[in-house]
Amino acid sequence: MAASTTGGAAAEKPPPATGGSGRTLRSLTKNPIIERVISLREGSIIVVTIITAIYFSANTSSFFTGDNFKTLLPYFAPFAILAAGEIFVMILGEIDLSIAAMYLFAPILFYKLNSSLGLGLVPSVIVALLCCMAVGALNGFFVAVVGINSFVATLAMLFTFEGLALIVSHGTPVSTPGGQQPLDTFGKVFGGGTYAELIWAVAIIAILQVVLTFTRWGLYTVAIGSNKLGAAEAGVKVAAVTIRNFMLCSLTAGLAGIFDAVRSGTVQPDPSGPNEYLFLAVAAAVIGGTLLTGGSGTVVGALIGALFLGVLKDGLILQGVNANYLLFYTGIAIFIAMTANVFVGRVRRGHSGSG
Amino acid sequence: MCSSGACAGGTAEVADANPPSIEPVVPPRSAPDDVLRVEHISKRFGPVTALRDVNLHLKKGEVLGLLGDNGAGKSTLIKIIAGFQKQDAGTMTLHGQPYEPKSVDDARAKGVDTVFQDLALIDELSVYHNLYLRRERLLKPFPILANRQMKREARTALDEIGINIPRIDVAVARLSGGQRQAIAVARSTVGSDADIILLDEPLAAMGAKEGAQILDLVARLKAEGKVSIIMILHNYVHVLQACDRVSMIQDGAIALDKPTSETSVEELTDIVVNEYRRAREETHAQEEKSALSKGKFQRPSA
């Protein structure tokens, strides 16, 4: 009762603390440049990544060097490629856990096709990737046609193909065809060259961002993620788009797997690494501004999200942080980055809402 | 159902009046200038009969109001005509040709466009992307969206039909309910060659002012003379004001089909009130029967 009698007076008062802090933040972000960066979907994580990089540069003399950039590359290029495909599935409001299996299975298949069947290097890559796309199509079929939840369907696919990878390879590591020193053109292009993965990552992300923003495919992907029934009623072929996106996701995962196998020179039939990459790729996508709930996302954000994770890992290693602490710090850093993301996102909506 | 209040007024008098005789099923009717004919359509969902035997026709340039209680089968009928669902039995003809839409796309290609009740708008997409969804303009020969062209054309088209949206490059999530509905209705005319438009409750959840804007829009579309419209409405005043003819669905069949000039709020109300009374009497009769049989209940003197 007391609450209801004072309710009238309380309503007259200015909004509580949250509104106040919002105002201070708003005055801080009056600067047109800052405002512009924030108005980008990826804006917040760009800011967070730059701050992280500045912090490490200031504290570690060896951070801001060309050599270190080369060390940094494998820490983010593969995740960026994995995340780029995953984002197309995440915007649909689905998730693909089987990318870890594709990442593991593609190089093993590539090796088998090349060494056992005697197929050429490039044809082996192409056939291996086509197989990945077939698995992606199967994922899409189970999700869009059969109606299994994507988490469950792709989890089953993850186990199936990681298992298959172990069966086919007998659990034995082998040398990657075309991945041995000195590298020929194939090895340099498909992941072995210093900047090969970076160039692939940037190219894939540029192409997929264009597809997402400027083509029907991208438009329908956002439409399905935002309002599946509405999109279907408007005539969007939901099942076809879903299957296509899962195929794309498996393709990029297989590609990243082959790149990493060529770069390291070994095909490692061990699911633990790929499983960690899966989570890092999803983390990169989410940190980059793609919602797990679907309807919204950016491929460029994946690159920046992956870069953030890479900078963090590399910076921590350079600072001499005990290897046992790396995961712990990564977890904390993701919390901080995501909280900053939500905060900046609120400011952004405040801005665009009034503008 | 009686959200408008239109059906509240007549109740007292109607109780004594003779119930107007309703034919349980209106037989197929037609006019020489029909664009669409729907004959003997039925549809079941498992044990539920949504449509029993529906006959409907739509003349060129006509606005037909479709009335009916919740669950009477209005939306199912619209979805069948729209190509979103398929009837179990019955035939449809469009411009005198057999009409069997395989999908919403197919129906749209044949000139039948629909604004669904749950608003097939995509919150995250901009106004102009929503307007052009599934008929995007492309920068031929590239598969790239011609966003600038769509924006320009959308602006012109919206101005033409008198929809005032300050910015068409914002996500529709930012628009008011009325603006969203206006965009949903405009979707069926902008960049489309539709000559039949189906509107499933275009005034649902809308204030008086916003509703009036949508009815104005319908009137303008009618005045242009290019399209014929079937519109599901709940408010009888709106039906009489905006439609040329009214069809009422009861229990999965058309129970009334009249030009609006020959009917009135009272007649429409009577039909519904009688329907309610019949339903209530049936329930009462059952209750009394079971109560009497248990001997706990004395029937009150009339």
Image (cartoon, helix red, strand yellow):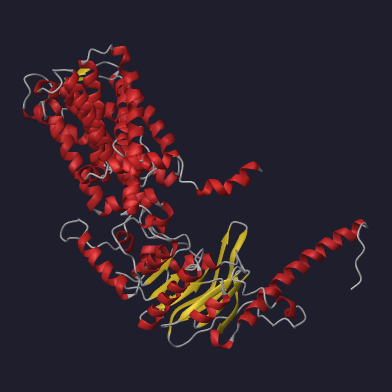
Q: Can residue A107 be seen from the camera position used here?
A: no
Q: Nearer the viewer, residue A108 or B279?
A: B279
Q: Nearer the viewer, residue A316 or A111?
A: A316
Residue A45: x percent and y percent?
A: 27, 35
Q: Residue at x 52, y 68 (%)?
A: B77
Q: Residue B198 vs residue A62: left or right?
A: right
Residue A115: x percent and y percent?
A: 17, 24
Instruction: Identify whether A315 is placed above or below B245.
Output: above
Residue A262: x percent and y percent?
A: 16, 24
- Quadrant occupied by the N terminus of chain B: bottom right
Q: Residue at x 41, y 83 (%)?
A: B60
Q: How many marks?
A: 0
Q: Residue B267 vs residue B92: left or right?
A: right
Q: Can residue A238 be seen from the camera position used here?
A: yes
Q: Residue at x 45, y 88 (%)?
A: B32
Q: Nearer the viewer, residue A149 or A125?
A: A149
Q: Residue at x 67, y 80 (%)?
A: B22
Q: Residue B114 vs residue A287: left or right?
A: right
Instruction: Identify whether A130 is placed above or below B63.
Output: above
Instruction: Identify whether A177 is placed above or below B244.
Output: above
Residue B98 is drawn in which quadrant? bottom left
Residue A351: x percent and y percent?
A: 31, 49
Residue B144 is drawn in which quadrant? bottom left
Instruction: Identify whether B84 is placed above or below A31.
Output: below
Q: Residue A194 vs residue B188: left or right?
A: left
- Quadrant occupied by the C terminus of chain B: bottom right
